[in-house]
Image (spheres, rainbow, N blue to C red):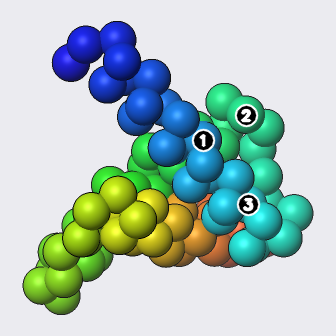
Amino acid sequence: MDIISLLIFLAIGALVGWLAGNIVKGKGFGMIGNIIVGIIGSVLGGFLFGLVGITAGGLLGSIIMATIGAVILLYIIGLIKKA
């Protein structure tokens, strides 16, 4: 992976983490935390959508799928924090 791909990957992770933090109010973790949530959320979203047999179509589809995964991740983190 070259430096440009890495920067794009981190930018999309930050965008997805920010979107998920706005959807699940009050669950943002700052810039670095949002990147981590976005990256883990994209993996989770890809895994869950793959189980159902849905594939992402292009960049927008990938962002939507990753955002849904990040929202699910933030919801799980919220449940764990409450316990």
Residue type highlighted by circle 1: Ala
Q: How many marks?
A: 3
Badge 3 crowding class, 10 Å Cα cut-off, few under 14, some 14 to 19, many 20 or more, is many
Residue at 35 percent across and 58 percent down: it is 59
Q: In this view, does 60 lie to the left or right of 71?
A: left
Which label belongs to residue 50? Answer: none
Q: Position of residue 51 (x, y in %)?
A: 16, 80
SS at badge 1: helix
Q: Position of residue 63 (x, y in %)?
A: 44, 61
Badge 2 crowding class, 10 Å Cα cut-off, few under 14, some 14 to 19, many 20 or more, is some
SS at badge 3: helix
Q: Name the residue under label 1.
A: 14
Residue type highlighted by circle 2: Met
Residue at 56 percent across and 54 percent down: it is 16
Q: Name the residue under label 3.
A: 21
Q: Nearer the viewer, mark 1 or mark 3?
A: 1
SS at badge 2: helix
Q: In this view, does 75 lie to the left or right of 12?
A: right
Badge 1 crowding class, 10 Å Cα cut-off, few under 14, some 14 to 19, many 20 or more, is many
Residue type highlighted by circle 3: Gly
What is the quadrant of residue 29 in the picture? Answer: top right
Q: Is residue 40 left or right of residue 14?
A: left
Q: Where is residue 68 in the image (x, y as percent from the top left)?
A: 49, 73
Q: Earlier in the sequence, mark 1 or mark 3?
A: 1
Q: Are marks 1 and 2 in contact (CB under 8 Å)?
A: yes
Q: How far apart are marks 1 and 3 (CA)?
A: 10 Å
Q: Confirm whether residue 73 shows in the render.
A: no
